[in-house]
Amino acid sequence: MAHSYSDRLNRVFDYVDQNLGEDLTLETLADVACLSKFHFGRVFQACTGETLFQCIRRLRLERAASLLLARPSEPVTGIGLACGFENPSAFTRSFRGHFGVSPTEWRNGNRSSSPAYERPNRTLMIRDELVSEPIVTVSQLPETDVAYVRHVGPFAADPDLFERLYARLFRWAAPRGLVSYPLTTYCIYHDSPGITSDEQLRLSVGLPVPSTVETAGEVGRLRLAGGRYAVATVELGPTEFAAAWMWVFGRWLSESGYEPDDRPAFERYTALTGQAMHGERQLVGICVPVRPADG
């Protein structure tokens, strides 16, 4: 993503994520980017490699693919409509064209022919068993403004990526008096590994800021939605994160009476000192937005 446009395009992605079920027009998104609608489409494609509406369609399909698995009792038709498709036939046709199977086949586990499942998915590999089982509470979390630095692309095979991202964020935040301890930080996952291609995975590292703080360039600002979250608190080593996420989604959720909704999940960290942020093991809160399961 071209650096000179990164803040504008990040705002567009954040807006699209929050409004996938709405009518997303060129005029609306050009306004979000503060660019002329006559130039915005060309800028977007040059910076991302996708046309604007190819990107919106992909994000809608990926959101639907995640929800089909997360909400097994919700009708397929309802998920398609909630993700912005005009009618069931358009949803089924688009889904099959992208994933190689129908929405129902995807939900039922027939995903072997899906392009998303032909790639090795290092992100979901479990290299270590969890040393300790997470403690899960269901809590109301407040709405929070977060200043962030975003990464687009593979991340599982780059152990130093997060340290580099936080270093860039803190270089911006420290001179503005926004780094003080104890300090809460976030890692927000906007896409689902195994559904979104590695090259298009988006994650953001961030810290809470007042709503009046202005951001620009590579530092953007988003609002984490408040509401009900399952918070799984656990101490993790560097190779245990994937196992912890899979425990939350594969074990706890299936027995909890809850299901995830369509807000992004994130990791929350609290550091008492600067040194605590870079320890071998870290206390992590895996925060998954949830609602009562249907049925």
Image (cartoon, grey):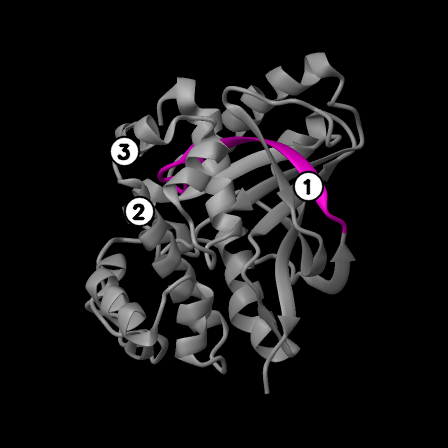
When the figure is inspected, residue 43 is found, relative to residue 198, above or below; the finding is: above
Tell me if residue 178 can be seen.
Answer: yes
The C terminus sits in image quarter = bottom right
Query: Which of the 4 quarters of the picture holds residue 262?
Result: bottom right
Q: Along the polypeptide, which appears first: circle 1 or circle 2?
A: 2
Left or right of 213 in this view: 253: left
Looking at the image, the residue that sits furthest to the top is 175
Q: Is the stretch drawn in magenta largely helix, strand or loop? A: strand
Q: Residue at x 56, y 35 (%)?
A: 205
Instruction: Classify mark 2: helix, strand or loop.
Output: helix
What residue type is disc 3 on? Answer: Gln
Camera-side residue: 36 or 263? 36
- Mark 2 closeness class: few <14, some 14–19, many ≥20 residues within 10 Å: some
User: Is residue 8 found left or right of 222 in the rendered image?
Assistant: left
Q: Residue at x 65, y 59 (%)?
A: 132
Circle 2 is placed at which residue position? 53
- Which residue is rendered at x = 46% and y = 28% of the image? 8
How far apart, in angstroms, are the residues tagged by discs 1 and 2? 35 Å
Observer-nearest of 35 and 186 = 35
Q: For residue 112, which quarter of the picture?
A: bottom left
User: Which residue is the site of mark 1?
Assistant: 269
Labels 3 and 2: the sequence-earlier one: 3
Type of amino acid at the residue the image marks with label 2: Phe
Q: Residue at x 59, y 49 (%)?
A: 266
Considering the numbered disc 3 on the image, is that residue within a helix, a strand or a loop? Answer: helix
Name the front one of labels 3 and 1: 3
Residue 97 in the image: above or below residue 271: below
Percent position (x, y) of residue 126? 43, 56
Which residue matches tag 3? 45
